Image: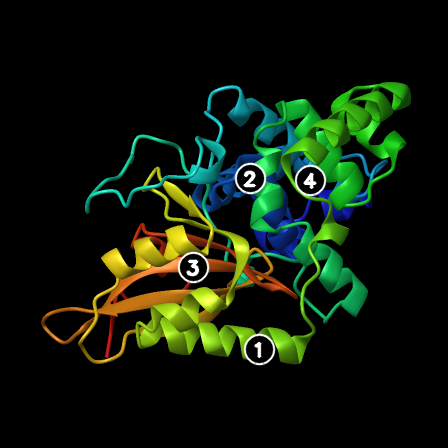
Amino acid sequence: MKTDERDAGPEEFGRLTDPYRRELLAYCYRMLGSVHDAEDLVQEVYLRAWRSYTAFDGRASLRTWLYRIATNACLNALEHSSRRVLPSGLASPSGDVPPMGSRAPEVPWLEPLPDRLAGSGGAPPDPAAVVAERAGLRLALIAALQYLPARQRAVLVLRDVLGWSAAEVAGMLGMTGAGVNSTLLRARSRLERLVPASDEITEPDEPGRRELLDRFARAFETVDIPALTRLLTEQAAWEMPPVPHWFSGREAIARLLAARLPSGREPNLLVPVRANGQPAFGAYLRGEDGILHAHSLMVITCTRSGIDRVSSFMEISIFDDFGLPRVHS
């Protein structure tokens, strides 16, 4: 990098570094499991980068330099934080529907990532790159990553998700190439026990997925529970953080929905969005006042056999992250 570039002011620094902001946010989110923590950390990364910019010697690319700062910041943050989880990672599925208001706000829950915040931005990338990027953000993968030690997590994300070379990762983490490869093997082995391989999750084609989601939305909005449960796979899961309980199988989920969804009123509403590279809905339930109130942000896992998982995040503040109103007209 030229000296005059290193001496650039805030505007020039922003021009050079802003193209990497979204992908750094996605990286920090993979490491931390929290959108808000990732956003705070990216702000810290850019502050650190600005303060030390004149010392950047250009031997590595600007992108590599920013990732090195982000990786160190993530590893430091993980030393002082608890693992973020989903209900399905805490206990066996529940048989009984929990009472209303049954929540565990003290648990550090995993958060969904709006698709609009992730990715590299700019010109549309190659379609294959889009598919790979979405796969690297799937909710099940992010949940599983949280069970890896911090350094294993960093190595696996950098090598397998972002495609960095062993030499690049070694330089970033102060390791040898052999150390990176052995750490990667341990991380892969542990991850395989936690999350299905990507080729085991066979999604329907786009027309099939659109039809499945449209049918799901109609059934949910009209509280047609038999129609809704027919769209689920036999071993489907339904979880509702911060409620610490989760349900597995059509019959258990049908009991949950029958107990929790209001019926006999005008239709509810599902607003389609995208989260973690997956289809999602902002769910609004019709209250006794006749108004549609924000209820949950549902991230959907689709397979060719049907809907395999619904992760229904019930913290209403999440609607703000997705640009959704808390009351829908």
Residue that numbered label 1 is attached to: 210
- For the residues labelled 1 and 3, the Cα–Cα distance comes to 16 Å
User: Does label 4 or label 2 sit earlier along the sequence?
Assistant: 4
How busy is the neighbourhood of tag 3: few (under 14 within 10 Å), some, or many (20 plus)?
many
For mark 4, does the 10 Å Cα neighbourhood hold few (<14), some (14 to 19), or many (20 or more) residues?
A: many
Q: Are marks 3 and 4 in contact (CB under 8 Å)?
A: no
Q: Calculate the distance from the C-alpha at mark 4 to the C-alpha at mark 1.
A: 38 Å
Q: Earlier in the sequence, mark 3 or mark 2?
A: 2
Amino acid type indicated by mark 1 = Arg
Tag 3, which secondary structure?
strand
Q: Is residue 170 above or below residue 96?
A: above
Kindly identify which residue carries mark 3: 298
The C terminus, quarter of image: bottom left
Alpha-carbon distance for marks 3 and 4? Answer: 33 Å
Q: What residue is disc 2 on?
A: 143
Q: Position of residue 29 (x, y in %)?
A: 56, 43
Q: Label 1 to label 2, Cα distance in Å?
A: 26 Å
- Residues tagged 3 and 2 counted as in contact (Cβ below 8 A): no
Q: Name the residue carrying label 4.
A: 66
Q: Amino acid at mark 2?
A: Ala
296 relative to 104, above or below: below
